Image (cartoon, coloured by chain):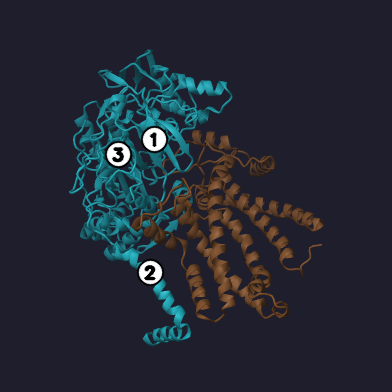
Amino acid sequence: MTGYLVRRVLELVPTALVIIAASFALVRLAPGSPFSSEKEISPEIRRQLEAKYGFDRPLPEQFVRYVGNLLQGDLGLSTKYPQRSVNEIIATGFPVTLSLAAVALVWSLLVGMTAGIIGAVRQNTVWDHSAMMAALVGISVPSFVLGPLLVLLFSLRLQMLPPAGWGDWRHLILPGLTLGTIYAASIARLTRGGMLEVIRRDYIRTARAKGLAERLVITRHMLRGGLLPVVSYLGPAIASMLTGSVVVEKIFNLPGIGPYFVDAAFNRDYFLVMGIVLLYAFFLLLMNLVVDLLYGLLDPRIDHA
Amino acid sequence: MRKLRRRIGGSSRSGQPAAWWLGWLLGAAVLVPLVGCQNRQSPFFGTVVPRHGPDELWINNSTEPEWLDPSRCSDSTGGEIIWNTFEGLVQAHPETLAPMPALARSWDVSEDGRRYTFHLRPSQWSDGRPLTADDFVFSFRRLVDPRTASKYASNGFVFAGGAAIGRGEASPETLGVRAVDDLTLEVELVDPLPYFLNFLSFYSFMPIPRHLLEDLEHRGIDPDLWTRPEYVVSNGPFLMKEWWFRQRMVFEKNPRYWDASSVRLNRVRVAMVESSTTALNMYATGEFDWPGGSTSLPAEFMDHLSGYHDFHQHPFLAVYFYWVNTKEPPLDNPLVRRALSLAVDRKALVRHVTRGGQIASADLVPDGLAGYRGLGQPVFDPDAARRLLAEAGYAGGAGLPPVSLSFNTSEGHKQVAEALQAMWQQELGITVELKNQEWKVFLANAEQMNFQLCRMGWVGDYADPYTFLELLTSDCGNNHSNWSSPAYDQLLEEANRQSEPEKRLDMLRQAEAMALEAQPLIPLYVYTRSQLIKPYVRGIWGNHQDRHPWKSIWIDSSADRSGRHSPTPEAP
């Protein structure tokens, strides 16, 4: 187990290097400059700005310097928000995105797994069809439709929750539901599918035969087998929840890190783009590792020794 | 088709009856409360009772500003904050924008109009330090100093020696700005600009607390961070108390402000909401009392919103136009360029496409700006357009190669471009290819003159025709037309040396006519600002530079909520 873990962590190093190099190259290849705007700036001012960020140096030197700073935990300065470092921007935005992800995750698991279990246990009944129908709607309705609908209902009509903004727990409910519903729908279908896969297996029949209560058969045996596809789906899903959602955070004006994926690229905010990409890559690699480890726990046949 | 639909409907009904009905029920459960409660009885959009404290205003400022440092700021969201936290020599009247005394109690102008002597009133920074003429000298030098790297350094080039300092050819100390004593400031201008005092109320010309910057440096703190609330020292009506990055800022009344007795709000909370629909929702629920001057209303709701009594609209000092690359055939022929301009039905464009009450105009300078009489070029004349095109040798568009039109990605720009494409095709038989480009790519192409026609908007920085006419001068870096004329440049230079305002305006008119004869750009319309203001918010005037000082705003809980109100009772 430990050996497996060490090997997997070591494998991450070349992957990370490739990601850094590729994103650095892509960001710099994009036409346009972080300092351009409708109003022209004089060459003297442009020189000063470029010198401040080190953009006047040759690209290979800039790359080496960037990686060097990265190893010391320094992600560089933002060009769009010149008074802030990328570290500070991520540090202020990440807690917001994390809270949103937590609400969305809890909601999606609660709703998704419940619907999935009902669907599997009551296969081909009204219950199953309704649950899967709801899941289909959940997958099909994009967050930019669901979000405004929820705002219209709960904020504008019923005036129960704030339409947008950030402050207390009430600001998290609508965006959490919006973001979580998409994942809930996928989780419902995966849970159902996974459980149906095992529902007619011998070990389930054995469990029933030895007189286990149906509730225990479902939770202890069926669910455990049925969870495998959900778990492998949850890895990347959690990684993407943790790096925020552009759409949901924009609709509800949450000051998380989601919008940077698009905005930083549009602004050619070189270091911020890199910082966000690396953060996402980090979570993705980490969550995939966690998923692989969880497999071993869920399915006794998988052994990482 | 009908058969197919019936089959699909039939199969789902017979296959999954319960789910099918449940789906319908669910859908109805959501839709009924949404649609059913549509309520258009109120003459106002959303709540009409203040939700916050008695002297508290909640507004939106759309996005996180780049800088709150007056010397470095170059965006309107930063300007909004600077204008309300700093005070310069003069201030713009909240309705007419005419320059009024601020920190300068009075001023003298030399006979040639190039030397101004300002007499400052005794006043204090928010930390209690006296504010002196030296703080202005420091600020103006810092603005033009290339080490500051200000995108608006050129604003300081109106002062003698400014341009040379900006090019790095002279030291900032040589700038024509001098503190005669603690309360007397003398400035020397390059030209006797008639709009100088109006221009001087711009945020670039606020004083800077030199003592704070030096103190921070002394303490080993990056002086660039001086505008953060934990350090900031300012001299305007409001002080920043909180700054939550990309969320909100909170301001409180500055008790040390020289005119504190006339400031009626105690607290202003400024959110940064980028999406205009989200801002609209927050206004409807009363979270915002006023979505702020910089928040635009979504065009698709404009017709609906304009029926409410809290909807207000006023012209804005900005022009929407297309640059023409005058070196690119067939657009190197001025006849073709003029034909293109005449073939645009601008009235139809603003009525059906932009829909925000914009003013159709084929002029570069908006009519009525600082006493300027607009040229009043025809906004649509398809017959003349066809004649000019025939004169250029392309009768009916025959033989004319396709022309490309670039715009940056945005639904609004795309709709305008498509409308023009259709009009030019229909009126002149010209094929237009649309090129939709991402913003930074678009800018790079504009800079390298890598286009035939490209869209642009220009916001006037000060109330004078020169802010637009300067665009077409030969050495203007913002001139993306490849067109230049020594005669035009000379006429503008002479006009700016002219000290008689009437004569100067005449010369500027001649210059504009000369430029539009060559048509290096195709003006389409003058912008308007549409905004929603709660009936209990008073003291906001719709002026063409969208400047709405918070110090003249107050909350009037007794406001009339029955009929159309005016947020502008009487000018101070």
Q: Quadrant of the N terminus of chain B?
A: bottom left
How packed mark 1 is, by other alpha carbons closer than 10 Å (few <14, some 14-19, many 20 or more), is many
* Residue positioned most to the top: B181
What's the chain of the residue with tag 3?
Answer: B
Residue at 53% across, 55% down: A103
Q: Which residue is mark 3?
A: B545
Q: Are marks 3 and 2 in contact (CB under 8 Å)?
A: no
The mark lying in front, picked from 1 and 3, is: 1
- In depth, the one of B2 and A167 nearer the eye is A167
Q: CA distance from mark 1 to mark 3?
A: 15 Å
Residue at 45% across, 50% down: A253
| Chain B rendering hue | cyan
Residue at 49% across, 75% down: A130
The mark lying in front, picked from 3 and 2, is: 2
Q: CA distance from mark 3 to mark 2?
A: 47 Å
Is residue B351 something that shows in the picture? yes
- Amino acid carrying label 2: it is Ala
- Amino acid carrying label 3: it is Gln
How packed mark 2 is, by other alpha carbons closer than 10 Å (few <14, some 14-19, many 20 or more), is few
Instruction: Place residue B497 in its image quadrant.
Output: top left
Taking the image as shown, residue A188 lies to the left or right of residue B334, namely right
As helix, strand or loop, the secondary structure at mark 3 comes to loop
Residue at 53% across, 77% down: A128
- Amino acid carrying label 1: it is Ile
